[in-house]
Amino acid sequence: MQVSEPTKNSGRPLRRDARRNRDAIIKAAADSFARQGIDAPLDGIAKAAGVAIGTLYSHFPSRADLVEVVFAEKLDAWLAAAEQAAAADDPWKGFAGYLEAICELQADDRGLSDIASMQTSLADRIDTHLTQTRDLARVIVQRAQEQGSLRADVSPDDMVFVIWAHNRITAATRNVAPDAWRRHLALMLDAFRAERSHPLPVPPMTSDQVRRAMTRPGEGEAG
């Protein structure tokens, strides 16, 4: 007698065919999210995986469940980069290395860029990772400013501009000059240096303004 496929949270091992379907869905989702972002159609992912949409939902009841699994490794790498930067012996190298690490992680993955550049609740684990990395980013900025290497008028929220710009640059150059973002990042890092800095024309965005700018349409903004 054939044993029915266990539920996602049953704790029992999946049958071989169910495991194969799950792996195919994750692979197809990773490819689709990287190319199209986290709003890639789920029916297209199911088709690419060679399964019915119902099979996809039996493994991943919501888009957030699928996104959480697909991006687990990269989110862990992002958090590890932040932890390493916050503890770096040279705070400036920590700051610069952190920006390079997150840009490199996002360079070939539009989905991760979406997660990094938009304020949206996807899954508890993802939200926890993002909160931890943002807290560490404040430490990274503060240490570099205390060292005197990072200009004093930089706010941790200014780092969001790097992510937004990087998102558009990689989208435009990915198939033409995939390393072009490194040149832009180097220019940005020079702009962040304290030496020879000039006064900025306007104050930094507040955290609330950043949150509102990152909120996806239809998610809590009333106009």
Image (spheres, rainbow, N blue to C red):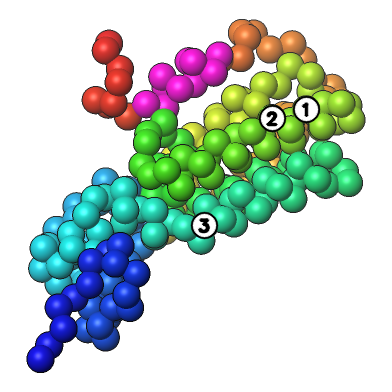
Q: Is residue 46 visible?
A: yes
Residue behind mark 1: 142
Magenta span covers which residues? 206-215
Q: Which mark is residue 74?
A: 3
- Seen from the viewer's position, the closer of residues 100 and 42 is 42
- Seen from the viewer's position, the closer of residues 129 and 51 is 129
Type of amino acid under label 1: Gln
* Residue 120 in the image, given as x and y percentages of width and height: 37, 34
Q: Name the residue rendered at 23%, 66% in the picture.
A: 7
Is the residue under label 2 in contact with that under label 1 (CB below 8 Å)? yes
Residue behind mark 2: 138
* Residue furthest to the top: 202
Question: Where is the N terminus found, in terms of image quarters?
Answer: bottom left
Q: CA distance from mark 3 to mark 2?
A: 21 Å
Query: Does dot 1 land on a helix, a strand or a loop?
Result: helix
Q: Name the residue rendered at 37%, 26% in the picture.
A: 215
